[in-house]
């Protein structure tokens, strides 16, 4: 058995080496870097330099506020929408189910830059289809990218468009694992379809919904592409800057790797903390 | 309580007809078992009675009222599913009371019904457990309890014991039988297991490929099957079928020659139909209806292939030409593989079928 294990590890070595160099080491290294002042040459060990700055940095709190705002508004809306989409996809009345399933999943495989460019165009002040639609129903057009609230709305809409279908497909798999005879038993118990949804479907989907929520929380904590490309680097005036964007700005524009590492660890810590709270809140009763 | 009447009930899935005009009367308080091999339409019939499947033709009446277009919940039935169909996220108590709570039934009445069902099924101790914390037998009890709290006119059981092990199955069979006596309500029970059918039923409906082959009391079906299918399906081990030709007929009997047994002949008295000379027929003999050599009307030599000694009974699987016979005799206890011996058939204990499987009486 020991020989077999040794052989297995020899085969695994190339992968483990790559994994250690490109995954494990950066994780350790960035943790160590977060305790160094990196804007001096050479870098020097200063444990409170970056973490102390983080605690009092208005830019960090602004990014944190924006990230959490997207988290608490966009994630629940997207999950709710995904559940509705999954239920519709699961309906026996639906024709061309495969086509809808593909259509809902397609946004995930569209290139991020392409989809961001299209969203910028759609919400453009003068040429965007959204403003044209608003005007066509007698409403005033909105300058989506010059004000913080509409800009945040655009980001939330874009992220929801991109990921709702993906979550719907996961929830659909959960829906299809609920045995049909449970619903038949409920039908014989004279339980309406609506009550069946709230008292049977939703509770039985809970593990899948929690899974989707955890994935979405992690994704939102790292949100970068949309505020970078759609609202042009967190504009207007940092109004849509997220933690991911702050990290990028500090690390790759200001080349302040120490502070960027501290932000990265804060993001990861927050994602873990929020996920744990969520898992605790939705735990199965004993 | 209510009688259930199926009149010329047809079921089609698209163009494919799976039930071809079933006519079945289930009396008030009767325990009727639908039995047949897989795909014979027994579960479909039950689901049509429950209202879980539309019917394509005919009428289904419960308590004298035609239920064709009545919602499943309004038919006064309760159903126990093969997979139990318990709500996995609810406790046993919540499972039992769910339907009543959702319909705004008074709390005191709901509690009374749940308590009564728990007492009947002896599941009081399990009330706060969830289905995954229960054994198969306990889950089955909860599923039956959920049916009891509805206080239905008719209980429907869809192969409720098929997921249980052999010992538990026997135990639950007795429980269901006791429940029927205790509640006195109409019960319709679907199974592919003829032993369950024989032990539980007041009357059995034998189905094959969407057709009702025969309806009758268990022993009537055993002793007097209408055709070769029923004769072979009811009874365990199965009835033996021996190929024969009619060599002579008179106005009261036919003399047949067993094809695979050295030309052994048997005079079978008949009263209704007389097959033509030369017609191919099949002689049906139950394993316990073989007698010692010389005791019957026709002796056939056989060679024991395998002997099964179960204690209370012994079976010999014997080769006689190309036919394998199952023989159950007192003397089977002494038989061993390879033994050569002779058995005898009594005409009065043998059944005659024509080539198509219809009974010749």
Image (tube, rainbow, N blue to C red):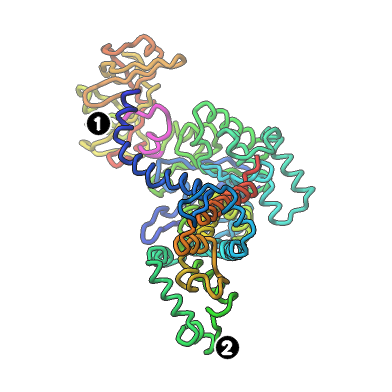
Q: Which residue is mark 2?
A: A140
Residue A258 appears in the rendering: yes
**Pair 1/2: label in front:** 2
- Residue A198, picture quadrant: bottom right
- Where's residue A219, x and y in %? 50, 58
The single residue placed furthest to the front in the displayed view is: A41
Which is more toward the observer, B144 or A157?
A157
Q: Secondary structure at mark 2?
A: loop
Residue B228 percent location from the top left of the image: 35, 37
Extent of the magenta region? B226-241
Please tell me whether mark 1 sits on a helix, a strand or a loop: strand
The numbered dot on residue B282 is: none
Taking the image as drawn, is residue B53 in sight?
no
At 62% from the left and 64% from the top, the residue drawn is A58
Whole-angstrom CA distance, mark 1 to mark 2, is 95 Å
The reply to whether discs 1 and 2 touch (Cβ–Cβ < 8 Å) is no
Q: Mark 1 sits on what residue?
A: B244
């Amino acid at each position: 058995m020991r020989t077999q294990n040794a052989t297995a590890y020899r085969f695994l070595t190339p992968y483990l080496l790559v994994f250690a160099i490109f995954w494990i080491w950066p994780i350790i290294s960035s943790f160590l870097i977060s305790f160094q002042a990196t804007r001096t040459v050479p870098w020097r060990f200063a444990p409170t330099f970056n973490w102390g700055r983080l605690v009092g940095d208005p830019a960090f709190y602004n990014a944190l506020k924006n990230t959490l705002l997207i988290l608490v508004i966009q994630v629940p809306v997207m999950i709710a929408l995904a559940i509705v989409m999954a239920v519709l996809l699961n309906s026996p009345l639906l024709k061309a189910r495969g086509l809808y399933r593909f259509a809902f999943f397609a946004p995930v495989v569209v290139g991020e830059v392409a989809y961001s460019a299209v969203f910028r165009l759609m919400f453009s002040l003068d040429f965007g289809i959204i403003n044209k639609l608003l005007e066509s129903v007698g409403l005033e057009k909105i300058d989506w990218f010059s004000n913080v609230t509409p800009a945040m709305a655009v980001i939330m809409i874009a992220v929801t468009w991109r990921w709702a279908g993906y979550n719907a497909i996961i929830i659909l798999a959960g829906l299809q694992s609920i045995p049909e005879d449970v619903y038949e038993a409920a039908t014989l118990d004279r339980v309406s379809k609506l009550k069946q949804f709230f008292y049977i479907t939703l509770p039985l989907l809970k593990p899948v919904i929690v899974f989707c929520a955890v994935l979405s929380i992690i994704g939102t904590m790292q949100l970068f592409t949309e505020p970078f490309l759609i609202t042009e680097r967190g504009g207007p005036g940092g109004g849509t800057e997220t933690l991911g964007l702050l990290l990028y700005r500090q690390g790759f524009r200001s080349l302040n790797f120490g502070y960027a590492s501290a932000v990265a660890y804060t993001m990861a810590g927050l994602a873990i903390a929020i996920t744990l709270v969520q898992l605790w809140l939705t735990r199965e009763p004993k | 309580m209510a009688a259930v009447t199926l009149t010329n009930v047809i079921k089609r899935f698209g163009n494919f007809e799976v039930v071809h005009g079933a006519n079945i009367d289930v009396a008030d308080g009767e325990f009727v078992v639908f039995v047949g091999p897989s795909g014979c339409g027994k579960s479909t019939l039950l689901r049509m009675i429950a209202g879980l499947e539309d019917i394509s033709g005919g009428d289904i009446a419960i308590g004298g009222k035609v239920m064709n277009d009545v919602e499943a919940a309004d038919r006064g039935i309760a159903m126990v599913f093969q997979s139990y169909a318990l709500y996995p996220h609810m406790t046993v108590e919540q499972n039992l009371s769910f339907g009543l709570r959702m319909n705004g039934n008074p709390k005191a009445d709901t509690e009374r019904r749940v308590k009564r069902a728990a007492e009947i099924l002896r599941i009081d101790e399990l009330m706060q457990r969830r289905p995954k914390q229960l054994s198969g037998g306990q889950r089955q009890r909860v599923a039956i309890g959920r049916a009891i709290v509805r206080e239905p006119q008719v209980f429907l059981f869809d192969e409720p014991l098929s997921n249980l092990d052999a010992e538990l199955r026997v135990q639950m069979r007795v429980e269901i039988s006791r429940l029927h006596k205790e509640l006195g309500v109409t019960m319709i029970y679907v199974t592919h297991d003829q032993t369950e059918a024989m032990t539980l039923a007041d009357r059995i409906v034998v189905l094959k490929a969407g057709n009702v082959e025969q309806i009758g009391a268990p022993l009537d079906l055993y002793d007097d099957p209408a055709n070769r299918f029923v004769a072979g399906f009811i009874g365990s081990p199965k009835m033996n079928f021996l190929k024969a030709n009619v060599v002579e007929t008179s106005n009261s009997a036919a003399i047949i020659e067993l094809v695979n047994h050295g030309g052994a002949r048997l005079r079978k008295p008949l009263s209704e139909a007389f097959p033509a000379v030369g017609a191919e027929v099949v002689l049906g003999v139950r394993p316990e209806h073989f007698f010692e050599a010389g005791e019957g009307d026709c002796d056939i030599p056989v060679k024991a292939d395998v002997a099964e000694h179960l204690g209370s009974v012994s079976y010999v699987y014997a080769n006689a030409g190309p036919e394998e016979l199952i023989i159950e005799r007192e003397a089977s206890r002494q038989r061993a593989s390879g033994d050569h011996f002779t058995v005898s058939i009594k005409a009065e204990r043998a059944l005659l079928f024509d080539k198509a499987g219809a009974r010749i009486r």
